[in-house]
Image: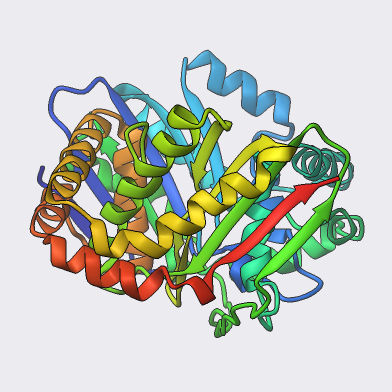
Amino acid sequence: MKTKIFKLNNGITGVIAPVPGLKSVTVEAFLKIGAKYESKGEFGMSHFLEHMAFKGTKKRPTASVINKEIDSKGASYNAGTGQEMTSYYITTVKENIPWAVEMVADMLINSIFDEKEVLKERGVIMEEIRMYQDNPMMGLSGEATKFMYGNSPIGCWNIAGEVEDIKPINRQKIIDFRKKFINPKELVVVIAGNVDFSASSEIEKYFGDLSNKTKTLPKVKIVINEDREKIIKKKMEQGHFAMMVPGISWKDDRKYAFKLLDIILNGNTSSRLYQKIREDKALAYYLFSISENFEETGFWGIQSGVKLSKLDEAMEIVRHELKTIGNNLKEKELERAKSYLVGKLELAMDKTEFLSNYLGEKILLERKMETIESELKRYKKVELKELKTLANEIFRENEIRSLFYRK
């Protein structure tokens, strides 16, 4: 796959990634705006700003106009907010590339943030937060991240914020936050799939005039909570739990071994914890890995829901596995994890949303272009001794944190 990377005069990075044989094409914009950069009084603002992108622009004044236009093209669209970046995309066909680039640019540059729409969306987001609070299966990962890093000087570690954070948000606060963080030098626009290099002119045409005098991003200092346990009292039939340990950042070259270790522990249906907790003991319906890597640090985690009377048993299985895995890893487990990862990545390359997200994240956050093929080579080179050393370093009993719901 030959990829073209170029810079506009205003500092925006453009990326054109043609993939022969595909019908679809994704246009996606990535901004270095995320929850970990939010100070007290701004919690939930990155997520709120993302919601407002589809609520009206000068050219398309209402959400209804935007939705009807996208539907008339048979296109799909979405957006997502994380700790370190926010992205917006439209997936369509090649003939619609100029329209899709213009639409994404219009939503990012010309949103009007109508006061009535802000107030309406404020209610929607508060209900979204309540939904996560009422459903531990959906909301526990955010609570776990907040438990790990919530003592840090800045950073909204539960991305949507809390209801009390959202109540005061109004149009002016949204506009001020946008001005503070929209920085062309921290913006990447990717077109991936059924596209050729001539599409770079569309990025220049619609994004070339964006300018903004913004401050540099605040320096993030992450403080890891020294507490080892938190109990959330809630009436429910299940006991939902999360267990976490501090991990490594995405800057760390051991991230390849870390990912393979995650797969072996709880990354698929043949993983150790899935087999022991669901298949052997039949204690749980679901087990999720909630591992994350940030620029400064990271963590490994698992969450699950079990019968209340079996909560301690399930958590002890996880604890025992973490304490012992560094001494009993097998070569066949490593090879199986590599094959699984390679297969998943190769299948994902058929999806233009995956490809655009992969390229945008690499270039925006890591400031480098690394092909999926070169990434796969890094995974294939990982040796068993690397996994054992990393496991013994990370999965120490005195570093295990537990967060759980019970009556």
Q: Residue at x 19, y 33 (%)?
A: 343
Q: Tell me, yes or no, if residue 159 can be seen here.
A: no
Residue in view at x 81 percent, y 64 percent:
173
Is residue 348 visible in the rendered structure shown here?
Answer: yes
Q: Which of 205 and 272 is in front in this view?
A: 272
User: How far across and down, in percent of the image, does residue 296 sit?
Assistant: 45, 77
Quarter that holds the C terminus: top right
Q: Left or right: 144 with respect to 9?
A: right
- At 31% across and 22% down in the image, what residue appears? 95
Residue 5 lies in quadrant: bottom left
Where residue 49 appears, as percent x and y from the top left, is 68, 53
Q: In which quarter of the image is the N terminus?
A: top left
Compared to residue 143, the image places residue 73 above or below, namely above
Question: What scheme was used to colour the molecule?
Answer: rainbow
Q: Residue 392 appears in which quarter of the rendering?
A: bottom left
Quarter-of-image position of residue 221: bottom right
Residue 114 vertical position relative to residue 395 in the rendered view, above or below:
above
The x, y position of residue 183, in whole percent, is 51, 69
Please give the name of the residue rendered at 63% of the width and 24% of the height, measured from the top-left corner: 67
Q: Where is residue 404 in the image (x, y as percent from the top left)?
A: 71, 52
Image-based side of 27 in relation to 114, left or right: left
Count all numbered tags in the image, as a single digit.
0
